[in-house]
Amino acid sequence: MAKKFERHRQAWTPSETENLRFMVGKGMSLKAIAKGLTRSEESVKKQAKTLKLKIAKAR
């Protein structure tokens, strides 16, 4: 069953963007970043692409 997100289609705040940059810099996985920001993996992936950030691949 798909997980329902309470924050559906919410704009990214500057604070969330900064946290995303920090987490990507730490080398965290997409799944961990999404959980930490309470965002969907697709939303995190899209925002990272917009900011030209590379998310580490899960090993």
Image (cartoon, helix red, strand yellow):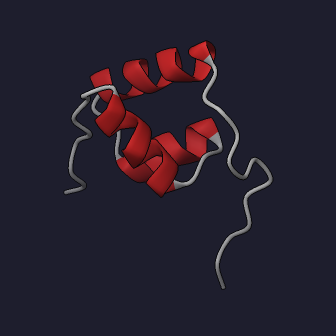
Q: Quadrant of the N terminus?
A: bottom right
Residue 31 seen in the current view = yes
Q: Which corner quadrant holds the C terminus?
A: bottom left
> Residue at the right extreme?
6
- Residue drawn at x 40%, y 45% is 46
Give left or right: position of 17 versus 28. Answer: right
Viewer-proximal residue, 10 or 1?
Answer: 10
Q: Position of residue 4 (x, y in %)?
A: 74, 67
Task: Locate residue 14: give its quadrant.
Answer: top right
Residue 33, given in percent of the width and then of the height, sits at 47, 40
Number of on-image labels:
0
50 up-or-down from 35: above or below: above
Q: Residue at x 21, y 35 (%)?
A: 54
- Residue drawn at the location 60% of the way across and 46% of the way down: 39
21 on left or right of 5:
left
In the rendered structure, the answer to whether residue 29 lies left or right of residue 43 reads left
Q: Is residue 18 above or below residue 3?
A: above
- Percent coordinates x, y for residue 20 in the rendering: 45, 26
Q: Is residue 26 visible?
A: no
Is residue 21 shown above or below 3? above
Seen in the picture, residue 59 relative to 46 is either above or below; the reply is below
